[in-house]
Protein backbone atom coordinates (compact mmCIF):
# COMPACT_ATOMS: atom_id res chain seq x y z
CA UNK A 1 0.00 0.00 0.00
CA UNK A 2 2.86 2.38 0.83
CA UNK A 3 4.24 1.80 -2.68
CA UNK A 4 0.88 2.73 -4.21
CA UNK A 5 0.67 5.91 -2.15
CA UNK A 6 4.03 7.10 -3.52
CA UNK A 7 3.86 5.68 -7.04
CA UNK A 8 0.72 7.54 -8.09
CA UNK A 9 2.02 11.05 -7.28
CA UNK A 10 5.38 10.24 -8.89
CA UNK A 11 3.65 8.96 -12.03
CA UNK A 12 1.45 12.06 -12.20
CA UNK A 13 4.47 14.32 -11.66
CA UNK A 14 6.44 12.52 -14.36
CA UNK A 15 3.53 12.82 -16.80
CA UNK A 16 3.10 16.52 -16.01
CA UNK A 17 6.83 17.09 -16.37
CA UNK A 18 6.86 15.32 -19.77
CA UNK A 19 3.91 17.41 -20.93
CA UNK A 20 5.55 20.64 -19.73
CA UNK A 21 8.79 19.71 -21.41
CA UNK A 22 7.08 18.98 -24.71
CA UNK A 23 5.12 22.23 -24.71
CA UNK A 24 7.50 24.77 -23.22
CA UNK A 25 11.08 23.76 -23.90
CA UNK A 26 12.54 25.64 -26.79
CA UNK A 27 15.69 24.99 -28.67
CA UNK A 28 18.31 27.42 -27.47
CA UNK A 29 21.28 25.40 -28.57
CA UNK A 30 21.49 27.38 -31.78
CA UNK A 31 21.30 26.71 -35.46
CA UNK A 32 22.01 23.01 -35.10
CA UNK A 33 18.40 22.03 -34.50
CA UNK A 34 18.04 20.99 -38.17
CA UNK A 35 20.23 19.14 -40.61
CA UNK A 36 20.22 19.32 -44.40
CA UNK A 37 20.45 15.55 -44.82
CA UNK A 38 20.71 12.41 -42.72
CA UNK A 39 22.75 9.22 -42.83
CA UNK A 40 20.49 6.60 -41.28
CA UNK A 41 23.08 3.82 -41.59
CA UNK A 42 25.63 5.88 -39.68
CA UNK A 43 22.88 6.76 -37.20
CA UNK A 44 22.23 3.07 -36.56
CA UNK A 45 25.92 2.42 -35.89
CA UNK A 46 26.21 5.48 -33.64
CA UNK A 47 23.05 4.48 -31.77
CA UNK A 48 24.56 1.03 -31.13
CA UNK A 49 27.79 2.61 -29.86
CA UNK A 50 26.34 5.44 -27.76
CA UNK A 51 22.70 4.77 -26.89
CA UNK A 52 21.90 1.06 -26.89
CA UNK A 53 23.56 0.38 -23.54
CA UNK A 54 20.78 2.35 -21.85
CA UNK A 55 17.94 2.49 -24.38
CA UNK A 56 18.32 -1.07 -25.67
CA UNK A 57 19.66 -2.56 -28.88
CA UNK A 58 16.09 -2.79 -30.18
CA UNK A 59 15.16 0.70 -28.86
CA UNK A 60 13.09 -1.06 -26.16
CA UNK A 61 14.33 0.99 -23.19
CA UNK A 62 14.88 -0.26 -19.68
CA UNK A 63 12.33 -2.28 -17.73
CA UNK A 64 9.92 -0.27 -15.59
CA UNK A 65 10.91 2.91 -17.45
CA UNK A 66 7.90 4.79 -16.09
CA UNK A 67 8.80 4.08 -12.46
CA UNK A 68 11.56 6.06 -10.76
CA UNK A 69 14.38 4.08 -9.21
CA UNK A 70 15.61 4.47 -5.64
CA UNK A 71 17.72 7.44 -6.78
CA UNK A 72 14.63 9.24 -8.13
CA UNK A 73 15.70 8.88 -11.76
CA UNK A 74 13.46 7.36 -14.34
CA UNK A 75 15.05 4.46 -16.24
CA UNK A 76 15.90 5.06 -19.89
CA UNK A 77 12.70 5.08 -21.95
CA UNK A 78 12.20 3.17 -25.17
CA UNK A 79 12.75 5.00 -28.43
CA UNK A 80 10.47 2.69 -30.40
CA UNK A 81 6.78 3.44 -30.91
CA UNK A 82 5.94 2.22 -27.37
CA UNK A 83 7.87 5.07 -25.74
CA UNK A 84 7.35 8.80 -25.67
CA UNK A 85 10.25 9.95 -27.86
CA UNK A 86 7.93 10.48 -30.81
CA UNK A 87 5.78 12.83 -28.72
CA UNK A 88 8.50 15.49 -28.91
CA UNK A 89 9.59 17.78 -31.75
CA UNK A 90 13.00 17.30 -33.36
CA UNK A 91 14.45 20.42 -31.73
CA UNK A 92 13.76 19.11 -28.24
CA UNK A 93 15.14 15.66 -29.05
CA UNK A 94 18.28 17.26 -30.46
CA UNK A 95 18.79 19.59 -27.49
CA UNK A 96 18.11 16.83 -24.96
CA UNK A 97 20.68 14.60 -26.66
CA UNK A 98 23.29 17.31 -27.10
CA UNK A 99 23.01 18.95 -23.68
CA UNK A 100 21.68 16.13 -21.54
CA UNK A 101 18.55 16.20 -19.44
CA UNK A 102 19.80 18.07 -16.39
CA UNK A 103 21.45 20.86 -18.40
CA UNK A 104 18.53 21.40 -20.75
CA UNK A 105 16.06 21.44 -17.88
CA UNK A 106 18.25 23.80 -15.86
CA UNK A 107 18.08 26.22 -18.79
CA UNK A 108 14.30 26.01 -18.43
CA UNK A 109 14.50 26.72 -14.68
CA UNK A 110 13.86 23.13 -13.60
CA UNK A 111 16.16 21.14 -11.36
CA UNK A 112 15.79 17.50 -12.31
CA UNK A 113 18.42 14.88 -13.06
CA UNK A 114 16.88 12.76 -15.76
CA UNK A 115 19.96 10.59 -15.98
CA UNK A 116 20.40 11.43 -19.68
CA UNK A 117 23.98 12.58 -20.27
CA UNK A 118 24.85 15.22 -22.83
CA UNK A 119 26.73 14.15 -25.94
CA UNK A 120 28.05 17.54 -27.08
CA UNK A 121 31.63 16.50 -26.34
CA UNK A 122 31.20 13.06 -27.91
CA UNK A 123 29.09 13.53 -31.03
CA UNK A 124 28.96 16.24 -33.68
CA UNK A 125 25.64 17.89 -34.35
CA UNK A 126 25.36 15.97 -37.62
CA UNK A 127 25.92 12.66 -35.85
CA UNK A 128 23.22 13.49 -33.31
CA UNK A 129 20.87 14.24 -36.21
CA UNK A 130 21.81 10.93 -37.82
CA UNK A 131 21.00 9.01 -34.63
CA UNK A 132 17.65 10.75 -34.35
CA UNK A 133 16.93 10.03 -38.03
CA UNK A 134 17.71 6.36 -37.42
CA UNK A 135 15.33 6.27 -34.45
CA UNK A 136 12.57 7.96 -36.49
CA UNK A 137 13.15 5.50 -39.34
CA UNK A 138 12.08 2.61 -37.11
CA UNK A 139 8.66 4.07 -36.29
CA UNK A 140 5.50 3.08 -38.15
CA UNK A 141 4.32 5.63 -40.76
CA UNK A 142 1.51 6.96 -38.56
CA UNK A 143 3.87 7.66 -35.66
CA UNK A 144 6.36 9.39 -37.99
CA UNK A 145 3.56 11.55 -39.35
CA UNK A 146 2.41 12.60 -35.88
CA UNK A 147 5.97 13.40 -34.78
CA UNK A 148 6.63 15.34 -38.01
CA UNK A 149 3.49 17.40 -37.38
CA UNK A 150 4.71 18.21 -33.87
CA UNK A 151 8.07 19.23 -35.28
CA UNK A 152 6.41 21.44 -37.88
CA UNK A 153 4.20 23.10 -35.25
CA UNK A 154 7.27 23.71 -33.09
CA UNK A 155 9.09 25.30 -36.03
CA UNK A 156 6.09 27.50 -36.87
CA UNK A 157 6.04 28.77 -33.28
CA UNK A 158 9.62 29.84 -33.89
CA UNK A 159 10.95 28.06 -30.84
CA UNK A 160 14.13 26.86 -32.46
Image (spheres, rainbow, N blue to C red):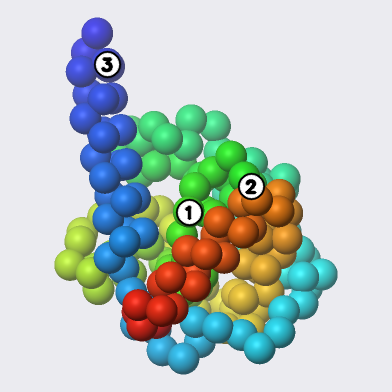
Horizontal and vertical percent position of residue 157: 35, 77
Horizontal and vertical percent position of residue 19: 32, 51
Q: Which residue is mark 2?
A: 80
Q: Earlier in the sequence, mark 1 or mark 2?
A: 2
Q: Which residue is mark 1?
A: 87
Q: Quadrant of residue 138?
A: bottom right
In which quadrant will I find the C terminus? bottom left
Tell me which residue sits at (65%, 51%) in the image: 142
Is 2 situated above or below 85? above
Is 15 situated above or below 130? above
In which quadrant will I find the N terminus? top left
Tell me which residue sits at (36%, 83%) in the image: 158
Q: Quadrant of residue 82?
A: top right
Tag of residue 4: 3
Q: For mark 1, does the 10 Å Cα neighbourhood hold few (<14), some (14 to 19), or many (20 or more) residues?
A: some
Q: Secondary structure at mark 2?
A: loop
Tell me which residue sits at (71%, 64%) in the image: 134
| Callout 1 touching callout 3 (CB < 8 Å) | no
Hey, which residue is sitting farthest top in the picture?
1
Tag of residue 135: none
- State how far apart marks 1 and 3 are (Cα): 27 Å
Q: For mark 3, does the 10 Å Cα neighbourhood hold few (<14), some (14 to 19), or many (20 or more) residues?
A: few
Tell me which residue sits at (72%, 79%) in the image: 38
Horizontal and vertical percent position of residue 145: 62, 59
- State how far apart marks 1 and 2 are (Cα): 11 Å
Q: For mark 2, does the 10 Å Cα neighbourhood hold few (<14), some (14 to 19), or many (20 or more) residues?
A: many
Q: Earlier in the sequence, mark 3 or mark 2?
A: 3
Amino acid sequence: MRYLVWSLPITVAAAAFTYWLSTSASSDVGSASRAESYDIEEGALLYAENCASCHGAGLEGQPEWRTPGADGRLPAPPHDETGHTWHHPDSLLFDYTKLGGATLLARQGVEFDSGMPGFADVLTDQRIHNILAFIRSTWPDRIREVQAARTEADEQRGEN
